[in-house]
Image: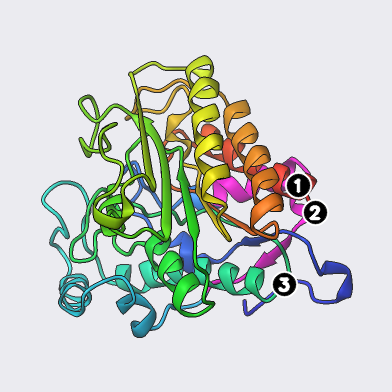
């Protein structure tokens, strides 16, 4: 698959969604929480809900080495390549196994995210969504939490260098704190981060505390909202008011939205209890903010989510809101 599934003037402006076996291959085996079935489970729900008929499917591509180097170090890329080609080892100390083909699958996830960035910035659409993206735990120089290459961070870097944007907002409602994003841009005043997550004292990666608001020239450009385990929609909506106030002051030119479905009630490895409605609400309100400040430009990334029904319904709800907001 190469480029758009359907071409023509009738598709100008429609939401773009990545559908590609190259990104579906990013997973760590059946039985692993981050299995390779997550891509197809989402697309099946998108189809059965009727939302697929309202969007344009877009292929991924392999991100170039230079694109990966915009965020990651050269030593790290070499380590991932060598370890994956060797097979049978771990990329981190905990839960991210290496295997032949993983480097390419991870690079395809980045390439899918960047295809959406380019499509949005070219004015072909104002919204995009990639299910197997939002890999927010990967640091510049190491793997963490099932995340090899940080497509969120690479997108933020290239929005500024390739397209010259002066402010990018990254909003994260995954149950886990987006530590790879936060600490990469902790001192960067041009990347505004609002991250709502389960309190790190109860959940990996143990970061994202209230007092962490940025460092140096970036103090005040970061917002962490840790929530107690079992927090549900009432706590979500209260915290979301703070997110909106933060974003209105930031006036971002582009919004990256990591909408991990592991914050929805019933996830097997987390403890928050949001409903699918919370994800839909966040998407709807972010579209409103994007319309006011960013020319409508917003890119959704699936992130975590290990209950298959939750991720299918949660991500479909986000895409539906993207479609209705056009």
Q: CA distance from mark 2 to mark 3?
A: 18 Å
Q: In the rendering, which numbered label is found on residue 51? A: 1
> Relative to 15, does residue 226 appear above or below in the rendering?
above
**Residue 54 got which mark?**
2
Q: Main secondary structure of the magenta part?
A: helix
Q: Which residue is mark 3?
A: 123
Query: Dot 3 lies on which element?
Result: loop
Q: How many marks?
A: 3
Residue 132 shows in this picture: yes
Q: Give the Cα separation between the discs numbered 1 and 2.
A: 5 Å
- The reply to whether callout 1 and callout 3 are in contact (CB within 8 Å) is no
Give the residues drawn in magenta, as a range: 40-60
**Is there a contact, CB below 8 Å, between mark 1 and mark 2?**
yes
For disc 1, the neighbor class at 10 Å (few under 14, some 14 to 19, many from 20) is some
Q: What's the residue at 24%, 30% (across, down)?
A: 200
Compared with 101, 323 (above or below) is above
């Amino acid at each position: 698959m190469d480029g758009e599934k359907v071409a023509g003037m009738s598709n100008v402006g429609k939401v773009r969604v990545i559908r590609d076996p190259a990104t579906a291959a990013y997973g760590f085996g059946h039985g692993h929480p981050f299995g390779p079935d997550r891509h197809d489970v989402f697309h099946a729900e998108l189809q059965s809900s009727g939302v697929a008929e309202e969007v344009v499917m877009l292929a991924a591509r392999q991100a170039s080495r230079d694109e990966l180097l915009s965020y990651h170090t050269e030593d790290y890329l070499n380590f991932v390549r060598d370890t994956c080609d060797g097979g049978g080892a771990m990329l981190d100390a905990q839960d991210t196994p290496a295997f032949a083909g993983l480097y390419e699958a991870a690079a395809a996830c980045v390439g899918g995210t960047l295809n959406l960035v380019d499509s949005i910035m070219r004015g072909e659409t104002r919204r995009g969504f990639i299910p197997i993206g939002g890999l927010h735990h990967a640091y510049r120089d190491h793997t963490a939490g099932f995340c090899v290459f940080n497509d969120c961070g690479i997108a933020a870097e290239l929005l500024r260098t390739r397209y010259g944007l002066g402010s990018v907002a990254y909003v994260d409602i995954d149950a886990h704190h987006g530590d790879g994003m936060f600490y990469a841009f902790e001192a960067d005043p041009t990347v505004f981060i609002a991250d709502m997550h389960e309190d790190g004292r109860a959940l990996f990666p143990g970061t994202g505390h209230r007092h962490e608001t940025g460092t140096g020239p970036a103090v005040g450009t970061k917002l962490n909202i840790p929530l107690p385990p079992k927090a549900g929609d009432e706590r979500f909506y209260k915290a979301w008011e703070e997110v909106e106030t933060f974003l209105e002051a930031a006036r971002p030119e582009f919004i990256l939205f990591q909408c991990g479905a592991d914050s929805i009630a019933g996830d097997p490895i987390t403890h928050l209890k949001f409903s699918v409605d919370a994800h839909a609400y966040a998407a709807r309100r972010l579209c409103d903010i994007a319309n006011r400040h960013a020319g409508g430009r917003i890119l959704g990334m699936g992130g975590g989510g290990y209950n298959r029904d939750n991720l299918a319904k949660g991500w479909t709800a986000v895409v539906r809101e993207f479609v209705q907001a056009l």
